[in-house]
Amino acid sequence: MSNPAFKGWQAATLGLGGNIGDPVAAMADALRRLDERVDCRVTSVSRLYRTPPWGKTDQADFYNACAAVETLLAPQELLAACLEIERTMKRVRVERWGPRTIDIDILTFADWTIDAEHLKVPHPRMTERAFVLMPLADIDPLLVVKGETVAMWLDSADRSGIAVANENRAWWRG
């Protein structure tokens, strides 16, 4: 892990998705739970996207979004908070890229590079996935990831089948 000394509020970006039950309600609930914490605040949320499945394609379409947060948590603590939200929302990890009620990934954390067993930042495959890059570009197209801006990564990403499901970026506020 390479990072400056941890001090105060840090900016992070999260990717959210799901395709079982009511994934939009689950993502909204997860964002509200994060925002209600004293050590996290949601500062921006993307539009909502409907996305064909990726990796394992014989399943229902996904809904995806990204959020910018500020947090007092260290990266591993933010991951633990996200995993706890998934657990309380009955997320079960059965198969890689398989169906899920909710998925919360840490995409970036300040300008840190982390290569730990359970946390890699920037998220290792985010620059290959339009379903991450499109909502992330809603929030910060000039965010630099792996030496290029999100907008530049998105220019070369395959956006096939991805559609905006909700233009209103307050969709999560319920």
Image: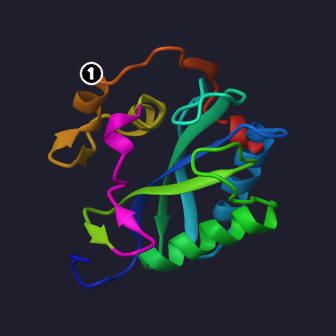
Q: How is the image coloured?
A: rainbow
- Total marks placed: 1
Q: Residue 99: percent from the left, percent from the top?
A: 70, 42
Horizontal side of residue 72 vs 158, given as left or right: right
Identified at 33% across, 82% down, the residue is 7
Determine which residue is flagged by label 1.
155
Does residue 136 appear in the picture of this structure? yes
Q: Which residues are magenta?
A: 116-129
Q: Amino acid at mark 1?
A: Asp
Residue 46 located left or right of residue 116: right
Quadrant of residue 53 within the rendered picture:
top right
Front residue of 50/52: it is 52
Characterize the local packing of mark 1: few (<14), some (14-19) or many (20 or more) Cα atoms within 10 angstroms.
Answer: few
The secondary structure that dominates the magenta segment is loop
Q: Position of residue 151 (x, y in %)?
A: 28, 29
Query: Residue drawn 64% across and 26% down?
Result: 168
Q: Give me the residue at 59% from left, 36% from top.
A: 64
Question: Does the magenta portion include 17?
Answer: no
